[in-house]
Image: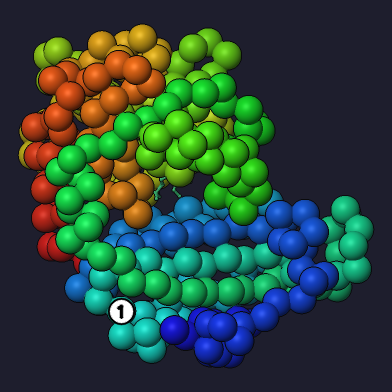
Amino acid sequence: RIAYVNGRYVAHDQARVSIDDRAFHFADGVYEVAAVLDGRLVDLDGHLDRLERSLRELRIAAPMARRPLTFVMREIVRRNRLRDGLVYLQISRGVARRDHAFPAQAGPSLVMTARPVNLAALEAKAGQGVAVMTMPDIRWGRCDIKTVALLPNVLAKQAAREAGAYEAWLVDAQGHVTEGSSTNAWIVDAEGRVITRSLSNAILPGITRASLMAAARAAGITIVERSFTVAEAKAAREAFITSATAFVTPVVRIDEAAIGNGAAGSVALTLRALYLDHIRRSV
Ligand code: PMP
């Protein structure tokens, strides 16, 4: 495997960053994960738009313009001979002596890696559906920024896994689901309406969420952006999660409650097929 580190393509195992990198000291950095299907980057414009926004919000300089960045992303796909997989990209504020305030001198660091995924295994997981576990959302007030400061997400995912669940659904002080630890959260009500929380500082604006919304609306499926409670989710006809890694994956259990008849929902599976069709056409 080949990685990219600040201007160089290097063997993944040999790739190194400084111990003075601000991502290491302070999690002072942002990232993106984009899927690769048939050798092509999925929802690339969306990911680059969100990356630029994250950088702007944190006042981190872009290490390079969009065109060359796109070139490096494609080059990482090419050099890894990636057909189906994921590209990970991280930009930190740079390398500087440890001091909380922004460094005057340092320029940003850019790291990129790629790895293959087993599409057949992903497809099997989607067909089966996954369990989620709810827990309090203890994150900060800017969850709309895709930072590498993911400790609450890590702890939530680990707690879910230890309880035999695949994902954690995070719940705000009002009892509403914000999102998953690394996915957006959705339900389908008794009338077949597809519901997901509206965008705010409380959730990451998922690129898969936006892309699925466009595909679903084009197919005449109603999407309602509003908050829902854990109780409403447990009583929903269906539930599912979205991310660049999971695409659309049905949820069949929330805590102890089976969702619907306990099998992957037909609306979720239809949306998954719609989404995959949409991205295969548009990449
Ligand atoms: N919410 C969180 C907290 C995430 O980490 C992710 C995945 N990066 C998502 C939602 C889904 O976003 P996307 O569809 O862009 O992968």
| Quadrant of the snapshot with the N terminus | bottom left
Residue at 53% across, 34% down = 159
Work out whether residue 57 can be spotted: no
Could you tell me the amino acid type at mark 1?
Leu
Residue at 34% across, 17% down = 256
Residue 151 x %, y %? 64, 44
Q: Within 10 angstroms of label 1, few (less than 14), some, or many (20 or more) residues? A: many
Residue 197 x %, y %? 38, 26
Residue 282 x %, y %? 18, 62
> Considering only vertical position in the picture, is 214 above or below 107?
above
Q: Is residue 20 left or right of residue 208?
A: right
| Quadrant of the snapshot with the C terminus | bottom left
Work out whether residue 171 can be spotted: yes
Q: Secondary structure at mark 1?
A: loop
Residue at 25% across, 65% down = 118
Q: Is residue 99 left or right of residue 78?
A: right
> Considering only vertical position in the picture, is 123 above or below 201?
below
Report which quarter residue 239 is drawn in: top left
Q: Nearer the viewer, residue 199 or 21?
A: 21
Q: Nearer the viewer, residue 58 or 268?
A: 268
Q: Is residue 61 left or right of residue 210?
A: right
Residue 55 x %, y %? 61, 57
Residue at 11% across, 55% down = 277
Report which quarter residue 189 is drawn in: top left
Q: Is residue 270 left or right of residue 139?
A: left
> Considering only vertical position in the picture, is 148 above or below 222?
below
Q: Which residue is mark 1?
A: 82
